[in-house]
Image: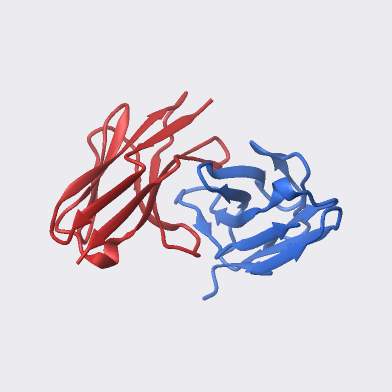
Amino acid sequence: EDQVTQSPEALRLQEGESSSLNCSYTVSGLRGLFWYRQDPGKGPEFLFTLYSAGEEKEKERLKATLTKKESFLHITAPKPEDSATYLCAVPGSARQLTFGSGTQLTVLP
Amino acid sequence: NAGVTQTPKFRVLKTGQSMTLLCAQDMNHEYMYWYRQDPGMGLRLIHYSVGEGTTAKGEVPDGYNVSRLKKQNFLLGLESAAPSQTSVYFCASSYGTGRTEAFFGQGTRLTVV
């Protein structure tokens, strides 16, 4: 059974204070790892897919990396508009996703 | 350019009532999914479909039924609602091949009293 664990559950940063979110996973065969952003009252919004250890992807202030056991979402010089819940997930054979519980990020001005 | 649309956005039901949630996607995706999201539990898969006319159970299927009569629509039914089904429901869809990411609707907030 696929399992995904995210830490920390919540993170408060000052604007400009860089940090990282962690996603550790246990799967029978990795078909990719997804990062999503979810704003309050909205559905998850796709950010990145990583497929193999060593792969990195970037989007604005966000960079996602992948190892054989975990993924990190690095946030560089965050702004208040980066405040959201960040979810990671792994897909099954029918692309159905197993999600972690998420990290709720708050960036204070 | 609607993407994934869920209807309704909010609903209050009495225990024992039935209802159907509608999900429609305009991206010609093969795969569609229903998830529920509860505080502290994250997103959990209820049912999914890998094509028109097919459905399969997810992690938490009890108390729900689904149908995929048309490729663009995926219906989630509650035959006899229970307070434990109070949740936010999300529909998602993805391609069957190639790009693998799923696209989500805006959610339906359901309260069963």
Q: Is residue A41 left or right of residue A19?
A: right
Q: Is residue B62 left or right of residue A78?
A: right
Q: Which chain is red?
A: A
Q: Is residue A94 left or right of residue B63?
A: left
Name the quadrant of the C terminus of chain A: bottom left
Display colour for chain B = blue
Indicate the position of residue A16 as horizontal and vertical percent values: 13, 59
Residue found at the far front of this picture:
B113
Using the rendered view, name the quadrant where residue A52 is placed: top left
Residue ID at (25%, 52%): A12
Residue ID at (42%, 31%): A30
Relative to B39, is A81 above or below?
below
Relative to B72, is B59 above or below?
above
Relative to B62, is B6 above or below?
below
Using the rendered view, name the quadrant where residue A65 is placed: top left
Indicate the position of residue A42 as horizontal and vertical percent values: 49, 64
Residue ID at (71%, 64%): B22
Indicate the position of residue B6 as horizontal and vertical percent values: 64, 66
Q: Say whether residue B71 is visible.
A: no
Residue found at the far bottom of this picture:
B1
Q: Say whether residue A66 is visible.
A: yes
Indicate the position of residue A76 as horizontal and vertical percent values: 16, 54
Residue ID at (53%, 41%): B41
